[in-house]
Amino acid sequence: MKITYYGHSCLLVENGEHRVIIDPFLTANPNSGGTTPDEIKVNAVILTHGHGDHFGDTLQIAQMNDCPVIATFELAQYCQSKGAKTHEMNLGGKHDFGGFSVKLTQAFHSSSVFDGKQFIYAGMPAGVLLSMGGKTLYHAGDTALFGDMKLIGERNRIDIAALPVGDNYTMGPEDAVTAAQWLNVKQVIPIHYNTFPVIEQDNKRLKSLFGDADIRCHTLQSRESLEI
C-alpha cells in the first residue's frame, strides 16, 4: 500500500492499478503543494463528511475519472443530485469494491455541505477502514476521541492510522496519542493540522509525543509518499 499526502486530510492510497483518494481538498488548500484536480487519477473518491475542507474537489475528480463517490447515504445523495456516480454506505457497513474494501466507522463531529447560500445536512460523519493489498488504513476523518476506538482496534488489524491532531475542531495531539494506543497501531500519519492558524501544531512535538508512546509518527509533507 502506497499513501501520498496532499495536505490537510487528503490521502491518495494505491496498490497497483487500484487508486482511491480520501477527502480531496485541493484547489482551496494552501498546503496541497499546488496539486490540481486534473492530476488525480483514481478509481473512487471516499468522503468522511461534507465540510468544504474535505469535500473539496470531489465532484470534479469524480467526473473527470468517471468514478463513484463513496460516502454516507445523505452525502452520496447530494453528490448524485450534482451528477456524480455514487456508492452510498452507512456507519458499520462494509463493501468490497474489487481490489479494495471500505468499512465506515463512527466519528464524533458534524457534517454539512454549503450549497450556494445555505448549509445542507450531510448525514453522519464517518471514519474509513480502507483495506487494499493486504494492508488496512484507518482514516479517522474529523473526530473527537471516543471510547469505541478501543473496539475498532480490537476488531480490526490496522496497519496505519491517519488521525486528526489540529485541536479546536477535532482531537488535539494528546488525545490522538491515546486514540492510537486504543487502536493498537504503531504507525500514524497526522492529518487536519497546519492548514489554518487555529489548527497549527509543531511537528517535532508531535513526533516526540507519539514517540514516547512507542508509535512512529510520519509527519508527511504535501505530495510526499509512504509505503507500508
Image (cartoon, rainbow, N blue to C red):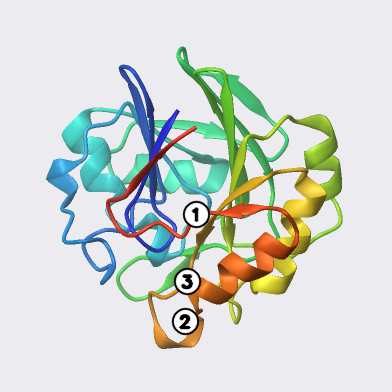
- Within 10 Å of disc 3 (Cα), the crowding (few <14, some 14-19, many 20+) is many
Residue 218: mark: 1
The answer to whether residue 120 of the structure is visible from this angle is: yes
185 horizontally vs 80: left or right: right
Front tag of 2 and 1: 1
Q: Position of residue 132 (x, y in %)?
A: 50, 22
Cα distance between the residues tagged 2 and 1 = 16 Å
Residue type highlighted by circle 2: Glu
- Within 10 Å of disc 2 (Cα), the crowding (few <14, some 14-19, many 20+) is some
Quick check: marks 2 and 3 in contact, CB under 8 Å? yes
- Within 10 Å of disc 1 (Cα), the crowding (few <14, some 14-19, many 20+) is some
90 and 206: which one is in front?
206
Q: Is residue 43 above or below residue 153?
A: above
Residue lying at the far bottom of the rendered structure = 197
Q: Quadrant of residue 13?
A: top left
Residue beneath the point at 67% across and 35% down: 158
Which residue has dot 3 on it?
193
Q: Is residue 85 above or below residue 174?
A: above
